[in-house]
Structure formats: C-alpha cells, structure tokens
Amino acid sequence: MDKVRFKLRRWDPERKTYQTSEYEIPVRRGMTVLDGLIWIKENIDRTVSYRASCRMGLCGSCGMVINGKPMLACETQILHLESNNVTVEPLYNYEPIKDLVADFHQFFEKQRTIKPYLIREDVEEQINPTREYIQSPEEWNLYIQFAMCITCGLCYSACPTTATDPKYLGPQALMNLYRFFADSRDQAEHLRLEIADQVDGVWGCHLATGCSEVCPKGVDPALAIQLLRKELLKRSLKLYRGKKISELAPPLPPRNKSPYRAFGEAPEFTIEKAEEKAREFNILKDDRVR
Ligand code: SF4
C-alpha cells in the first residue's frame, strides 16, 4: 500500500480566507480522491467539508479542482494521478462556502434564465397529456449528446470568460439552451435564439474550449455554442428556415380493430409462428400451443 499526501485548500468562512491542511493517507489500487477525502474525515479530521453523493459520476456533486484541473472526485483514481502529492481545491469561478464546497447559486440562476424545459403551443396537451410526440432517431441524435449533462459545473470552473465576466451565461447554460433549441418537440426557437444572441450570451465565448475538455460526460458545450452562433448567422443572412416540429402520435385504433391485442398479450402472428416452429421441431404432440 502506498502513502500519498493530500493538500487541501480550504475556505474559512469566518476569517474569509483560504488555509491549507495536509494529510498523509494510505492508498490502495482503485481508491478515488473522494475515497481519500472520506478517509481523512473518518480517520484524521472531522471538520473537513466537501460535497458528494452518488459516488459514480452521475449526480455531479463532487466537482473539485484536483492537481490544477476541474474533475469529479468520485471518478478520479488517486494512483492515476501519478503523483505522491494530491492538491484539492474548491471549484474555480464559484464563491466558496466552506472548505471544498462551492456555492452553485449563480450556476442555477443562469440555468433558469435559459428556460430549461420544453416549450410548446399545445398547452392543454401539456397539462393533460394524451399521447407521445413522434421523434425520429435523426431528430433525437441532434440533441441527445447535450442532454447528458449532470450539472456538475466543471465547465464553468475551466472557462476563462466566466472567470472575468460574472454576467456571462456560461458554457453549461448555453449548451442546455442549444439542447432545447435542437429538440424537435420544442417550439420556442425564436425565444431561445433571442436569449443566446447577447454579448453575455454566445458572443461572450472566446472559444478556449476548456469547458469541453473537462466535461466528464463528453457533452462538448463549446460545440453547442458554435452551433448556436451558426443558427444566428443563418438567421441574419435570411437562410433560416425553421425546424420541423414534432407532432402528437396518431391515436391508437379501437381495441377490437387493432392488429395488436391488449397490452401483455402476444400478437397473433407470434403465436402462429411459434406453432409453426414447434411443429417443425416436433415439439407439439397435438396441434396446440401448450
Ligand atoms: S456540460 Fe459537462 S462539465 Fe458542464 S455541467 Fe454539464 S456535465 Fe458538467
């Protein structure tokens, strides 16, 4: 078992300053930075504060700057860092709350600004849904990559514009805006492009692409911002045609006319085919499916 030195840059909310604490911890193969922090809390210093939940890269809670790079502590194995010194800091470009815990208030405020939900004109259907919306695999492909975001906020920590302009909407909010813009079920493309078309919107991006580099889910916010710029440019050149909007699936035929029986029952052709196969392999003694 190796020993590794953890150096934590901790925010002290009472003194309003950072202080550094160092701890030596035993490391096993497969142990993550989050495991290391848990070990410190359980064995050395109960006062250490950090945020974590799922431990499997899904909740996005344990974003921290580890050896200078924004990463998820639960997905970062200590031995993969190839260093006997591990520096852990709270995410950059956020107000710190305590120790390694960053304040996500602004992050979610910006998220709210872009209206992160489907907007449609058939309001009654939204309140009392009757059917699904039809969406082809091609339409799904247009936005699904951007729907993988876990709101971990690492992209803001790597973004030089966010570091210098607190009003900048930021990579995650703009990416999410594109996610809904590209969704064929959404009918608010004009509103969405209006939100994006601001100095603190897509035009604030300097295309440093740090956001895409650190994203643990391969979401690529920099690409989304470029795609939004392309849409705005097309519109200014009057090349914008509008997108095809998904419609409601047709109603199911009445049960007695349906080629399918009630849910849970196999369609008739399956039974016939099964009988045929069974006869072929001599499984059926009499002429009936058992
Ligand atoms: S885009 Fe990536 S880095 Fe940014 S919040 Fe979403 S998952 Fe995290």
Image (tube, rainbow, N blue to C red):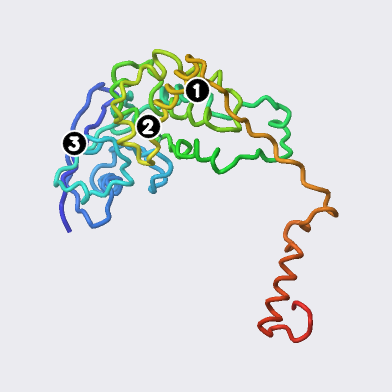
Instruction: Measure the alpha-carbon separation of dots 2 and 1.
Output: 16 Å
Asked whether, in this view, residue 62 is left or right of residue 29, the answer is right
Residue carrying label 1: 114
- Which is nearer the eye, 269 or 237? 237
Lower position in the chain sequence, tag 2 or tag 1: 1
Q: Quadrant of residue 251?
A: top right
Residue type highlighted by circle 3: Ser
Q: Position of residue 66 (x, y in %)?
A: 24, 38
Label 3 to label 2: alpha-carbon separation: 25 Å
- Mark 3 neighbour density, 10 Å: few (under 14) some (14–19) many (20 or more): few
- Check disc 3 and report the residue beneath it: 21
Outermost residue to the right = 256
Q: Quadrant of the N terminus?
A: bottom left
The residue drawn where x is 43% and y is 41% is 59
Which tag is nearer the camera, tag 2 or tag 1?
Answer: 1
**Mark 1 surroundings: few (<14), some (14-19) or many (≥20) residues within 10 A:** many
- Amino acid type of the residue tagged 2 in the rendering: Gly
Residue at (28%, 49%) from the top-left corner?
Answer: 32
Identify the residue under disc 2: 153
